[in-house]
Amino acid sequence: MNIYDEIRKLKDERQAVILAHNYQLPDIQDIADFNGDSLELARKATEIDSECIVFCGVHFMAETAAILNPSKTVIVPDEHAGCPMADMITGEQLRGFKAQHPGAKVVCYVNSTAEVKAESDCCCTSGNAVEIVRHYEGQDVIFVPDQHLGSVVAERLERELILWPGYCPTHARFNPRDILELKEAHPGAVVMAHPECPKAVRDVCDQILSTGQMCTFARSDSAREYIVATEEGLLHRLRKENPGKVFHRVSPFAVCPNMKRNTIEKLLFCLRDMKPVVAVEESVAARARKAIEQMLAWS
């Protein structure tokens, strides 16, 4: 029995479902029951009947699944797969920031810890951030932690937001020069960039899209060639779903080391041992749940 058959056997025995983010390694994406971006995975987590959720992503994603499913067991292949952006703000820091802006609503990107979600009015993802903030028209809005996604929202809604200076180190590695060189080499290619990219990068791109939106766009768009400015894990899904199209990565350095901590071997071990388990203290989870559920209601 090979490792993939072992995983499938254990998954059935544990009554488990495997969720994988679009940035996961190809073999994990291929064996997962569902692949998606943060919004797609958050929605899927609310629909699962299985007793166990195996979350292949980074820690805040598994926390979100645990918050939405307090009666289920949530396990991860590697408990040390964290998110540097999420670590750029704490609940205590957010409380202090809120005190400086009394009356402001807080919208937190889902790439944040449970304690930050618990201090927020509503969560958002890169795919629905504009839609969420639009609900707070006429009110001051604090947007944490990603300054780049926040600036995209501010531009599209033509309004000011109070931004926390966080960012994604992986998307910060892109630069406009690399994209312009690729556009020159592939003049017919459509350039898709994630909103976590800095403005100088976004300004030379054709489409600013979440990973889920990139997949939808590539399936329906008439172009045959694309330049993709996001973590390289997404290219596996794009190529798999669009075998007649060509997708170019922008940089070999745009790799999230935390996403890549999850391996097929660790996936097997976590199903075998039913650990590491991700749990959130209920006093925090109850408050964070309100912010997540508000997002899902408005999405």
Image (cartoon, rainbow, N blue to C red):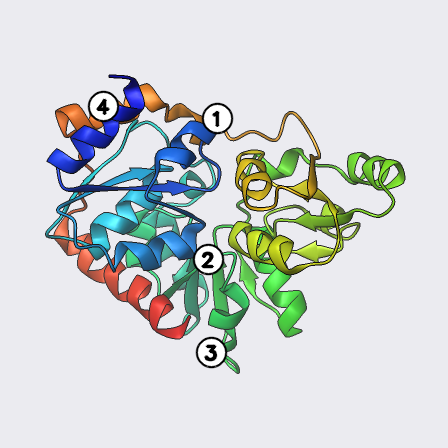
Closer to viewer: mark 4 or mark 1? 4
Name the N-terminal-most of marks 4 and 1.
4
Q: Residues within 10 Å of mark 4 (few under 14, many from 20)?
A: few
Helix, strand or loop status at disc 1: loop
**Residue bearing mark 1:** 257
**Residue bearing mark 4:** 6
Q: Residue drawn at (59%, 37%), measured in percent from left and top?
A: 235
Name the N-terminal-most of marks 1 and 3.
3
Q: Is residue 73 left or right of residue 103?
A: left
In the image, what residue type sits under mark 3?
A: His
In the image, what residue type sits under mark 4?
A: Glu
Q: CA distance from mark 3 to mark 2?
A: 15 Å
Name the N-terminal-most of marks 4 and 2.
4
Asked if disc 4 and disc 1 are in contact, CB closer than 8 Å, the reply is: no
**Residue bearing mark 2:** 125
Q: Write down the quadrant of residue 14 in the picture.
A: top left
In the image, what residue type sits under mark 2?
A: Thr
Q: CA distance from mark 3 to mark 4?
A: 47 Å
**Residue bearing mark 3:** 135
Asked if disc 1 and disc 3 are in contact, CB closer than 8 Å, the reply is: no
Q: CA distance from mark 4 to mark 2?
A: 34 Å
Q: Residue drawn at (45%, 67%), measured in percent from left and top?
A: 101
Which of the two residues, 258 or 97, is positioned nearer the viewer here? Answer: 258
Name the N-terminal-most of marks 3 and 4.
4
Q: Position of residue 192 (x, y in %)?
A: 68, 50
Q: Write down the quadrant of residue 169 in the picture.
A: top right
Q: Is residue 101 left or right of residue 115?
A: right
Q: CA distance from mark 1 to mark 2?
A: 21 Å
Residue 59, compared with residue 133, is above or below; it is: above
The quarter of the image holding the N terminus is: top left
Helix, strand or loop status at disc 2: loop
Name the N-terminal-most of marks 3 and 2.
2
